């Protein structure tokens, strides 16, 4: 029997393996999933190097949110290793002054011992408005955040703040590329997707209705259907 194709998963901030569980459960019989470690490094470059060191020689890359920032760096460093790229709920620009100030505010809260306050503020932003009262989903997001912890959050926050603008390098991405976005995503906008769609040669976009930022958790069946078809094409 042929070995299952390897697929590296690059996670967003404050998320754990639980974010990918619905995808792995649906597609694990067909693909060998490998989760990259985004908990150790304070730079996107460090995350990308760690991902490449732990990945097979050739792989498909599925990246969510902050993981997309890592994916852009992987494509700059080792494009020949990536068979295909799926970018979920992400964007290419670096932070502007307003985003930087907001992130610095989060850092100050954590350094003052109020990591829980950051979690409380972030949860509603991540979800479709109709799911913000879903106790199971909210509990899962909070659990992932607390498992990630304050120190890892600070490392991830500094990495995000220090990332470069990836828009100038989008045209150099030559592997097949899929963009996936929840239609009500309050972080990765439709304009962000259009920017990538126009810049990455041959890219295509799938939007998921009634969905916010956390596509694998909010609409697991639809996300698995899209990614299963993409990876098996």
Image (tube, helix red, strand yellow):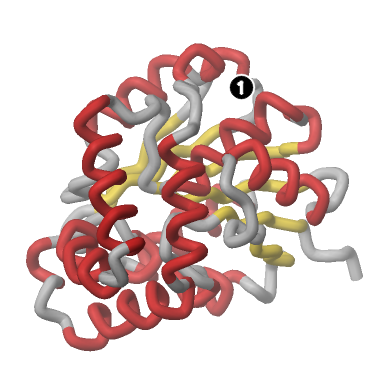
Image quarter hosting the N terminus:
bottom right
The part of the image, by quadrant, that contains residue 207 is top left
Residue 4, above or below 22: above
- In the picture, measured across the screen, residue 184 lies left or right of residue 112, that is left
Q: Nearer the viewer, residue 121 or 90?
A: 121
* Residue 201 seen from this side: no
Residue 215, above or below 70: below
Q: Residues within 10 Å of mark 1 (few under 14, many from 20)?
A: many
* Residue 184 seen from this side: yes
Residue 233, above or below 25: above
- In the picture, measured across the screen, residue 146 lies left or right of residue 17, that is left
What residue did someone put label 1 on? 173
Residue 146 % position (x, y): 39, 78
Residue 118 % position (x, y): 25, 64
- In the picture, measured across the screen, residue 226 lies left or right of residue 100, that is right
Which residue is at 31% across, 24% downward? 194
Residue 13, above or below 179: below
Q: Nearer the viewer, residue 163 or 81?
A: 163
SS type, badge 1: loop
Which residue is at 53% across, 53% downward? 229
Residue 99 % position (x, y): 25, 36
Which residue is at 54% across, 73% downward? 17
Which residue is at 38% across, 73% downward? 145
């Amino acid at each position: 029997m042929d070995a299952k194709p390897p697929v590296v998963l690059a996670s967003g901030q404050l998320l754990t393996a639980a974010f990918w569980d619905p995808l792995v459960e649906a597609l694990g019989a067909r693909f060998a999933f490998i989760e990259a470690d985004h908990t150790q490094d304070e730079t996107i470059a460090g995350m990308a190097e760690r991902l490449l060191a732990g990945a097979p020689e050739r792989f498909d890359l599925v990246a969510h949110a902050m993981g997309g920032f890592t994916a852009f760096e992987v494509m700059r460093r080792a494009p020949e290793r990536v068979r295909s790229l799926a970018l979920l709920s992400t964007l290419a620009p670096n932070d502007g002054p307003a985003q930087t100030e907001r992130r610095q505010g989060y850092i100050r809260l954590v350094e003052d011992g109020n990591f829980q306050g950051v979690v409380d503020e972030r949860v509603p932003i991540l979800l479709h408005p109709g799911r913000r009262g879903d106790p199971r989903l909210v509990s899962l997001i909070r659990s992932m955040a607390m498992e990630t912890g304050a120190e890892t959050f600070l490392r991830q926050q500094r990495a995000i703040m220090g990332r470069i603008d990836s828009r100038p390098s989008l045209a150099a991405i030559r592997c097949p590329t899929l963009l996936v976005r929840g239609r009500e995503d309050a972080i990765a906008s439709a304009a962000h997707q259009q920017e990538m769609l126009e810049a990455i040669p041959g890219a295509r976009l799938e939007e998921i209705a009634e969905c916010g930022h956390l596509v694998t958790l909010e609409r697991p069946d639809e996300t698995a259907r899209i990614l299963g078809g993409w990876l098996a094409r």
